[in-house]
Amino acid sequence: MSSSTAPDRPSFSIADRPWIPVRTRTTYEHVGLRELLLRAHEFDDLAFAIPPVSSAVLRVASAIAARICGLDDEELSASRWNRLRRDLLEDTGRFDAKEVHAYFDRHEYRLDAFHPVRPWLQDPRLAQESDPAGINALVFGRATGNNFAWFGPHTDAAPHPVPTAEAVQHLLLHHFYGRSGAAKHRTVGTYRHNKLTSGPLRGAVSFHPLGRTLFQTLLAGIPAFHGDYQPVVDRCPWEEEDLPDPMAPPAPVTWPGRLLTARSRHALLLVPGPDGTTVTDVHLAWATRHPKPAALDPYVVLQLNPTANDPGKRQAVRRADTGRAWWRELEALLLAPDESARARRPQVFDTLNDLPPAVRDTLRVRVHGFHQDPKSVDYGWYTALTPPLLAWAQENDPGRAQRIADCCRTAEDIEHALTRAANQAWKDTTTPPGANRSSRPARRSRWAERAAAAYWPLAEKTFWRLLHDTDHPVGPAFAHDAITALRQATASAVIQHSAAARARTTATTTLRLAGARLPKGS
């Protein structure tokens, strides 16, 4: 009697299949999470083509690194925690292979992207609770809803499967940067709903300490315990014994696992191709309808407005902007927390001065931004790399830090003055004689947009010059850049219209006075 064997089910181990691109000098390769940590001391940096994926993977890998090194022990005092991290960086120089293997072996079946019971960062119940959404709904950059087609004309009528290694990256993007709005209905018992709420990092820009090796990067990027999380067992989603109840409130945010990896608002389920090398469809639905639990992400800058009447508006996450140069964030990154400051640096920066000098002095900052609207439209992603910054921090060089803060603040203030002056000049030029010219323009004028675009490249050159020329007043220098930008933006108009020339002269005077009125120290 012959017997037939059932084909092996599709499988893709997040731990052991290569899906993470890494760089070692000029060499690139792909590794799984296990090898990423085993060889972290060999790699220079992650090398994802989509910067927000790097930000998500750094959060996941930092949480695992904390587990492996014992840096997730909230019973450790601040001094003991810092000492343990220093010892690991100075004496060990790499993650302990036995601890790495023990961790991944312990959670092996929950680290399979296609496991039938516990697929990694997915909910298998969606197969019965929600209809498939189509593969284009998974891939950021493919046209869905109101989004632009970034990389190719994909349609639901002719879907193209996605390599599994790439699909896992987009899975992470949904968990961290996912959209809000309508999706496929999910039915749980008698409850049926189709609305998504946005991911915890939607529209955010993240700042990650970057060491000379990925080992240094991960240890420097582990946030310290601040005592403001509930004293319950901390687990990452793949460490949980059971799937979360979508009708129950989310588990309280705990440090560091849930803080870094478990604040998603989306539930997904990848549909594999026959051999598991591709993903052909996805289920995408809400994970919870309860309010977002309060949590402060340790890698974001907070904009502060202590005078706001609404407590919820007194601090907001600095939003990503593809048109915003990284140097404009230096004030927020270098100044120590201050109640009177306009921004608060990422919490992970608070303990960087406790790193060994050899690590601290070479530490740079990797910027990962995803420019998105709060709902569903994605505009673009970007990354930037700063030079070593900690020598300029307020704790190390208060004079230099204050000079940087003065330059950043003044550059922003002058840009606001430029926008107002350009808007008024536009209004004075285009308003018919006898009409009311006293009211403000209803929106940003064409001159204001052109002037701002011309201003920031000029301001960047001035910024770096002023850091070395500390005797030069800051206000007039940036006002000069604003005047130059305004002249460029209105050059053709003043040739054609005498009213434009008069309006520009008035705006120029306004900008010159704005620069002179700023404090002398600025």
Image (cartoon, grey):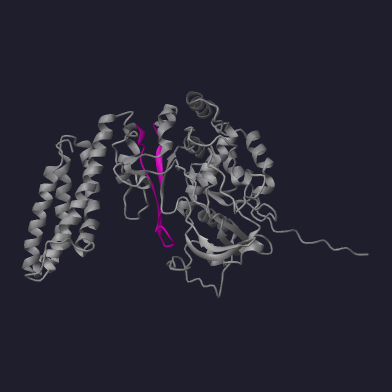
Location of residue 279 in the rendering, given as x and y in whole percent from the top left corner: 61, 62
Residue lying at 44% horizontally and 27% vertically, measured from the top left = 356
Q: Is residue 278 visible?
A: no
Residue lying at 35% horizontally and 55% vertically, measured from the top left = 322
Residue 310 versus residue 233 in the image, above or below: below
Location of residue 89 in the rendering, given as x and y in whole percent from the top left corner: 51, 29
Residue 274 versus residue 239 in the image, above or below: below
Q: Does 7 sit left or right of 127 as displayed?
A: right
Which part of the image, by quadrant, shows the C terminus?
A: top left
Q: Is residue 187 visible?
A: yes
User: Does residue 456 belong to the magenta stretch?
Assistant: no
Residue 390 versus residue 14 in the image, above or below: above
Furthest residue toward right: 1
Location of residue 146 in the rendering, given as x and y in whole percent from the top left corner: 43, 68
In which image quadrant can residue 465 be found?
Answer: top left
Location of residue 411 in the rendering, given as x and y in whole percent from the top left corner: 22, 46
Magenta part of the protein: which range? 361-390
User: Does residue 389 belong to the magenta stretch?
Assistant: yes
In which image quadrant can residue 193 be found?
Answer: bottom right
Residue lying at 55% horizontally and 46% vertically, measured from the top left = 262
Which part of the image, by quadrant, shows the N terminus?
A: bottom right
Closest to the observer: 298 or 490?
A: 298
Question: How many numbered circles does the render carry?
Answer: 0
Closest to the observer: 506 or 28?
A: 506
